Amino acid sequence: MPSNPQDRSFIDVRQGLQQALTQVQKPARYTGGEYNEVIKEPAGIDVRFAFCFPDTYEIGMSFLGEKILYELLNRHENWWCERAFMPWTDMKAKMEELHIPLYALESKDPLTKFDVVGFTLEYELCYTNILAMLDMAGIPLRAADRDESWPLIIAGGPCVCNAEPMADFFDVMQLGEGEQMLQDICAEVEKAKKQGLTKRQLLENLAGLPGVYVPSFYDVSYNPDGTIRAVTPNDPHAPAKITKAIVKDLDSFVPPEHFIVPMIGAVQDRACVEVLRGCVRGCRFCQAGQIYRPFRERSPQLISDSARALCQNTGYDELSLTSLSTSDHSRLEELLDRLNAWAEADHVSLSLPSLRVDNFSKSMVDKTTKVRKSGLTFAAEAGTQRLRDVINKNVTWEQIERTCTIAFKEGYTSVKLYFMMGLPTETLEDIKGIADTAQKVVDLYYSLDHAKGKGVQVTCSVACFVPKPVTPFQFCAQDRRETLREKQKYLLSCVHSRKIKVNYHDSATSVLEGVFAKGDRRLGRVIETAYRNGAFFDTWEEYFDYDRWLAAFAACGVDPDFYNYREIGLDEVTPWDHLDVGVSKAFLVREYQKALRAETTQPCNRQCSGCGANKLLGGPCFEYSKDLV
């Protein structure tokens, strides 16, 4: 790796690619030229935006957020949104050897030619990839080292709900939903260019937009014990608290209808339409269920029309209805009827991810298997009813039994169940409950007469629980790695059937994820140190090096245990208290205390729990009828 990447000299991208692409695996990752990509004439463009995904092409091309914003920005004739992905290790090495800068796929122009370079913060272990991409582009890593000559470096995505670990590297961070916010940012960039504003003036204008966080406009002070004393604005244009941007009416933004069709198979290579945003369930472990509140739906007619146009414009024959809880759409049956009115004739199959065991039905199976039958996955999350109540899963064994019975009677012979390990108040009895639940599902299958002579497979996917910001469990300490390993061993000892398969992952990545999930601005030095020492592609098992991270913490004098193995006081100032996603801290405290008593909270569409997110809509999230309250 060059010691001074911002000072290196680069060669012409196209010239370098002629040599590089013959020496790497999957060269189609780096060529562009896909069907439906957008090409514009640079001379007529006022704002050039590079959307950067900090992982491989196959993963980035599966990301719906990029598809939404790519199509939205490119609807402006004088704006051009292009794409860049993290090159795989062979291509990264070849680009550095040949001095090829990181470039956008559409124009092959280096990222330094863009007005805005935007990254999505989807997952904490992608942070070093972001630094690698900036480095490969020759862009200084830290915002403080970038003057007027550099592009504006911005970030969005769910991890911005705690922006602090990456705050030093970005000029602007977007809190909330990007459809309108990103357009407003680009409009301010265009205005600043035409008016000749300084970077400081641009940042001050951006700081006034809903959901825009300018980290350099805030100072962080600490208490003697290492906790945060305060996060204080240092610029009069910066609000004391940043409130997330929100799309009040999803129908006001038509879903993308012209997906770029990838050159090579993406991880999720199908048509998909977001049918709703938010979640009514209130699971206490789930960050997405909190930060995407309040619950909003798209109309069945708009979903159907956009889905058909998307399939026709791409040639996809599989359509996924995506959301955090698709089966909670209040007009799901109508939606499925509208889709099936054309999908079967067009040979398009339907799939519903995020199925819920308490509203799964034979009708749903019938309406989603007319072309082909996909697998079934249900999230039980915990193995005992007590622990399901603690996490507010609001699912009973009777509902699991009913759902699996329907599935087995409809011809399914395999079911995947999601669980978590390391949840607050968890005991070994709860761990055993995972195996017991799986065994009961196996026994249920063989209790049905039609199942004779056929085999069943129940797969338990068990993730390590990571307490996340803006959840009721943000106050909890994370299970230590040694404890999680013991629990994993115990779970395997409780499984006594070859019909049950248990999958789990290394707890080391969960430890690091926990540190950066609840970390503060002091972690920026750790991330940069680890990157300089060779850390990138930390999401990939073959490149993740836990010892390298421990060395980076030690070199920076930072104790990682402080962040994830310590309970947070209910009145403690957190690194994300100045970032308001709509859900109040008082609500999180109430839910945490109810969790410790194993008390449940009704779903939002049955009874309001007073989370505070309705303020973002300016009114109630739901019109409650008397029989629901």
Image: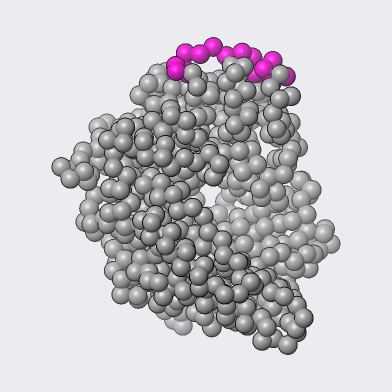
Q: Is residue 183 visible?
A: no
Q: Residue 112: percent from the left, percent from the top? A: 53, 20
Residue closer to the observer: 134 or 442? 442
Vertical arrangement, residue 196 with respect to residue 493, above or below: above
The residue closer to the viewer here, 316 or 477, is 477
Q: Position of residue 608 (x, y in %)?
A: 39, 70
Is residue 421 shown left or right of residue 110?
Answer: left
Does the image show residue 26?
yes
Taking the spot 66% from the left edge, 48% from the top edge, the residue there is 267
Q: Residue at x 63, y 50 (%)?
A: 255
Residue 466 percent across, percent down from the top left: 41, 56
Residue 14 occupies quadrant = top right
Query: What percent of the width, then of the height, locates residue 477?
Result: 31, 57
- Asked which quadrant contains residue 470, the reply is bottom left
In the rendered image, the vertical position of residue 549 relative to residue 594, given as above or below? above
Residue range highlighted in magenta:
3-18
Q: Is residue 24 left or right of 3 when viewed as pictured?
A: right
Establish if 471 lies above or below 309: below
Tell me the quarter of the picture where residue 424 sits: bottom left
Q: Looking at the rendering, in which quadrant would you find the C terminus?
A: bottom left
Q: Is residue 25 magenta?
A: no
Which residue: 50% across, 35% down? 536
> Relative to residue 63, is residue 195 drawn left or right?
left
Residue 131, compared with residue 388, is above or below; it is above
Observer-nearest residue: 225 or 585? Answer: 225
